[in-house]
Image (cartoon, rainbow, N blue to C red):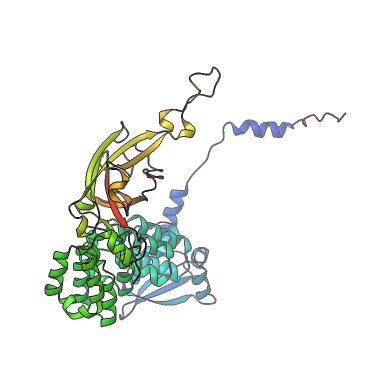
Amino acid sequence: MPALVLPARRTAAQRAELGADTAAATINHAPALLQRLQGLLQRGNGSDAVLRVRPAGSDEVQVFHAHQLLLALQSDVLDGLLHNRSVLTLDEPPDSAALFDRFLRYLYCGEVSLQLHQAIPLHRLASKYGVASLQRGVAEYMRSHLASESSQGHVVGWYHYATRVGDAGLQESCLQFLAWNLSAVLGSAEWATVSTELLLLLLERSDLVLHSELELYGAVEAWLARRQPEARVAERALRAIRYPMIAPSHLFQLQVQSPAMLRHRAAVQDLLFQAFQFHAASPLHFAKYFDVNCSMFLPRNYLAPAWGSPWVISNPARDDRSTSFQTQLGPSSHDAGKRVTWNVLFSPRWLPVSLRPVYADAVPGALPAARLEDGRPRLVITPAMSSSDFAGVSFQKTVLVGVRQQGRVFVKHVYSFHQSTDEVPDFLAHADLQKRASEYLIDNALHLHIVVKPVYHSLIKAKK
């Protein structure tokens, strides 16, 4: 039989220490310490390093009296530059030089205030001098302020900067924001600053949110007129337009009225001819001869009424809601007069089967029934017609969720699913609709836009 081990008796000192824990407290004078460090930087008391900051193209020099220990704690780069020397001259771009005092303040106090136009120069300083915490902080500020209002726009510039410095996370955040809010960008001065690489990257995407493909063509034409790129770039951009998504009447107008089309018509002649064939023939017949399972025949997220409908749900946490709307059967003119009616059900607290109380009410001692509060929001979109009414066509459904940030409404969340399911699987999975301050709500309402994207399928190929 194993021996019984009794707990060791605590000494009087240990008992006294444990007793003191009940009255433990924290004395925090950190704000006062930060204030002293800030004063140390401002007055230069005990300074052992001089930083001379010279803006590029200027003879003016800013002089800062600093302390090597504090600089070394935050920046290995500055520590190395100051090795065996006390005076350091730093050449900086003018916008970075203008923020060097704030950069130093961060090194001393760990905090900094900034505005939209200061994000890039401050991030540039943090990157140059290896201050990783400030790099991360500024990058997070940029990701959380993509929707902020600015006179000339800033997201395109941030995307180009993120590309240059290799910040893949910021680059993807900017690209996604531009894609999901493209209509707002197309109508702003920011559109003219889009680089060739960014333009072509956007044109490849099927998740662009905009009014119509014709709107996109007009924006591309305006970009070409302003930037005057070489013919190869212009033709590549024009060939990325999805002409089958534009009505024939507008395609005829483009051929005689569009300067870009008149100049580069030969480069897109085959696409125009194919688009007219697409609109003239029955989709089932067209699909026998051409591959319609490619991006040219796939709609983007169009906001025009023929492709979907907005839906504002007030007090979405209250009870189930339903609505209905109609869309055009398909993008082909052959289907222009055909409509599909869609029924939509929204439930704020739907319980998955695994959580539903099957036996809890009938069997004594069973586990407590799941509460409605345990459920999650659910959105179901079903056609009011049988599937035989649209043979050869399937539907991709996309739900856009609008949010408001810094006084501006924009699309931040996008949920997509295929015809094989009627339900958005991860819809609002992380939303708390009970909170009035939820980022998913605007004035306690859920702002949705449901987009239905008809997709034709290639059938049995006809022998040529």
Specify start and end residues of the magenta stretch as a single range: 3-11
Magenta stretch encompasses residue 237: no
User: Can you tell which quarter of the image residue 431 is in?
Assistant: top left
Q: Percent from the top left, x then y, of residue 411?
A: 29, 52
Residue furthest to the top in view is 364
Q: Percent from the top left, x then y, of residue 220?
A: 22, 70
Q: Nearer the viewer, residue 131 or 291?
A: 291
Q: Nearer the viewer, residue 455 or 242?
A: 455
Q: Quadrant of the N terminus?
A: top right
Q: Is residue 43 visible?
A: no
User: Can you tell which quarter of the image residue 424 is in?
Assistant: top left
- On screen, 10 above or below 120? above
Q: Percent from the top left, x then y, of residue 338?
A: 20, 50
* x 54%, y 77%: residue: 84
Residue furthest to the right in view is 1
* x 28%, y 34%: residue: 321
